[in-house]
Amino acid sequence: MTFDLTPEQDQLRDAVRALGRRYGHGYFVEKAKAGEHTTELWAEAGRLGYLGVNIPTEYGGGGGGITELAIVCEELAAAGCPLLLLVVSPAIAATVLSRHGTEEQRKRHLPGLADGSQKIVFAITEPEAGSNFHRLGTVARRDGDGWLLNGRKCYISGVDEAGHVLVVARTEDSSTGKLKPALFLVPTDAAGLTRSKLDMEIVSPENQFLLYLDDVRLPADALLGESLDAGLPALFAGLNPERITVAAMGAGTGRYAIERASEYTATRKVWGGRSIGSHQGVSHPLAHAAVQVELARLMIQKAATRYDAGRDLEAGVAGNMAKYAAGEAAALAVDTAVQVLGGAGMTTEYGVATLLGAVRAGRIAPVSREMILNFVAQHVLGQDKSY
């Protein structure tokens, strides 16, 4: 057992940290408040190969795994630039395509995902279904040689930045008549696909949307994979990378908040010339938050290692635990940072209150803490399913 990164992973961490700090949280907030995207940072990260670290080398990627992508997510977040589309495009879409796409689909999309010139977002969540993907109402029906999609999706990230959206729908199994999941690569400019921006109380350069699919006609090769049988395994292929990279982004955000607060409390002097950080009422909450973030990082490392070793069931448990731990730790770290900075903590200048909305959302999405606890109770503790 080792907790050490390889020399290559260490170099990756250092390089991504340096890139993130050149842009910094000020850049992130400025873009978000202007209604713009982090285009420059994304393009540079792609040019340097960081967006494609988990994509096979034959498609222009780095040939690494989710461990490497988690490093990228964490270090950019630790520099104050938590990029949600890292989770959506390289982690979910690229993994699903690498594992279950046809060779033509891989050749068409993976090189662009690797160099950052292409983004593919992911649409599974629906207004009525909530966390229950078995109740998805988006349906795909045969239309000659192609497909016809109808349905609605909500909280879909970055549609305005992407060329395609990977839509989870249900299709009719001709042998049983039952509906089964399938994934479709839908161009974001397809006829019949419309979107409505959701106003969110989150400071983020990445937007959320409602999607409406009204008789969206697609060619046969829009179906991801060789057949409908690829649907269910393809759907689950993206879930563990999603949880692990979301957790890494949360851990990085927690590190960023603690670093900002620690710099302030070590130098801020009010009573008798001593720094406010010398008082346990200030230092202990920060230390407690630091412990929680570090514990989350250990679980993230375990989950990523299990996933990259092909141990999917174990990675599922560890990934859910990592997401839970990092979501709680990030929320605690940012809230603690705001508190110890006092009034300064609520200003844009000090760069911690700007993360309150994002870390609160991290306890809800992409899977809520309550659903993770249900998962652990059922699959780890052997309890009956409660829903």
Image (spheres, rainbow, N blue to C red):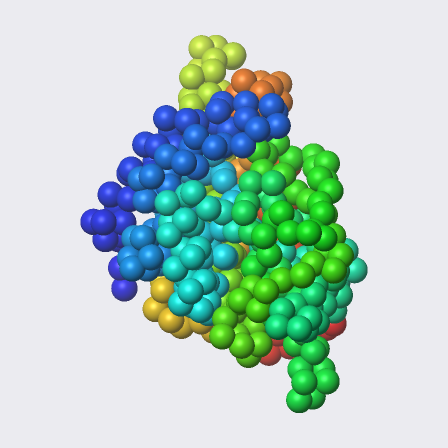
Instruction: Inspect this view and state whether residue 235 appears.
Output: no
x and y percentages locating residue 5 in the rendered image: 27, 52
Q: Residue at x 28, y 44 (%)?
A: 12
Q: Compare residues 118 and 129 and report the one nearer the observer.
A: 118
The quadrant where residue 383 appears: bottom right
Q: Compare residues 114 and 261 and report the one nearer the observer.
A: 114
Quadrant housing the C terminus? bottom right
Left or right: residue 107 compared with residue 247: left
How many numbered marks appear?
0
Q: Give above or below for 87 relative to 318.
A: above
Q: Give above or below for 275 relative to 219.
A: above
Q: Residue at x 49, y 51 (%)?
A: 89
x and y percentages locating residue 219 in the rendered image: 59, 65
The quadrant where residue 31 appears: top right
Q: Give above or below for 113 relative to 237.
A: above
Quadrant housing the N terminus? bottom left
Q: Residue at x 58, y 20 (%)?
A: 348
x and y percentages locating residue 76 in the rendered image: 42, 38
x and y percentages locating residue 191 in the rendered image: 68, 52
Instruction: Inspect this view and state whether residue 167 appears.
Output: yes
Left or right: residue 264 compared with residue 115: right
> Seen from this angle, which residue lies furthest front?
144
> Seen from this angle, which residue lies furthest bottom?
175
